[in-house]
Image: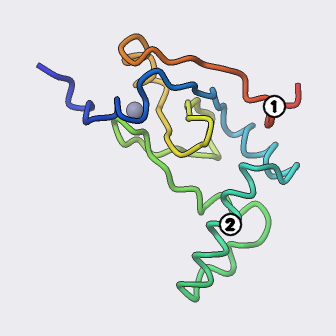
Amino acid sequence: MEDWRLNGQEKYLQGATLYKIVFPQFWLKAFAERNTFYDMIADRAHRFAEQMQRGGEYLEGNKLRHFFHVHCEFCMEKVITDKECEFYCTTDMQHWVCSECFNDFKERFGWNVVQNEGESGE
Ligand SMILES: [Zn+2]
């Protein structure tokens, strides 16, 4: 029987290149450097506040992280930016996979994990 978590992810995740992301460090670094990951969340936050006419108080500083709402593509686990955890994401950061699903499916999907050079700076 097929794993319940599989639902056509092959279309966008087969053979994908993934970044390994470690929180909370990844967010803290993004926040400090105002890098592309930070910009992505900030952009979303500002659009939300504008459209909904609320949430403006969360646009300040580190609270922006509350606008990051993504889930594992397989088990729907929420990606948390302020606790210690590991996730994997596509290089455009549109698709996220939790470490458990990553380990369960890495062979089937043939993922290639690379260092996130733009964000790590090490
Ligand atoms: Zn998962």
Which quadrant of the figure has residue 84? top right
Q: In this view, does 5 lie above or below 104?
A: below
Which quadrant of the figure has residue 100? top left
Horizontally, is 97 left or right of 31 in the view? left
Instruction: Return the x and y of residue 61 as percentages of the image width and height.
Output: 79, 65
Colour setting: rainbow
Locate ligand 1 by image quadrant.
top left
Horizontally, is 61 left or right of 45 in the view? right
Q: Which residue is drawn at 76% across and 50% down?
A: 36
The residue under label 1 is which amino acid type?
Answer: Ser
Instruction: Return the x and y of residue 97 as percentages of the image width and height.
Output: 47, 33
Residue, disc 1? 120
Which quadrant of the figure has residue 27? top right
Q: Residue at x 56, y 35 (%)?
A: 90
Q: Which residue is drawn at 64% across and 69% down?
A: 45
In the image as oriented, which residue stretches furthest toward the top?
Answer: 107
Instruction: Return the x and y of residue 74 as percentages of the image width and height.
Output: 35, 35
Instruction: Return the x and y of residue 68 as percentages of the image width and height.
Output: 58, 56
Horizontally, is 15 left or right of 24 in the view? left
Q: Which residue is drawn at 42% across and 35% down?
A: 12
The residue under label 2 is which amino acid type?
Answer: Asp
Instruction: Using the image, tell me which numbered label, if any, was put on residue 43.
Output: 2
Q: In this view, does 20 lie above or below 31?
A: above
- Between the residue at mark 2 and the residue at mark 1, the CA separation in whole angstroms equals 21 Å
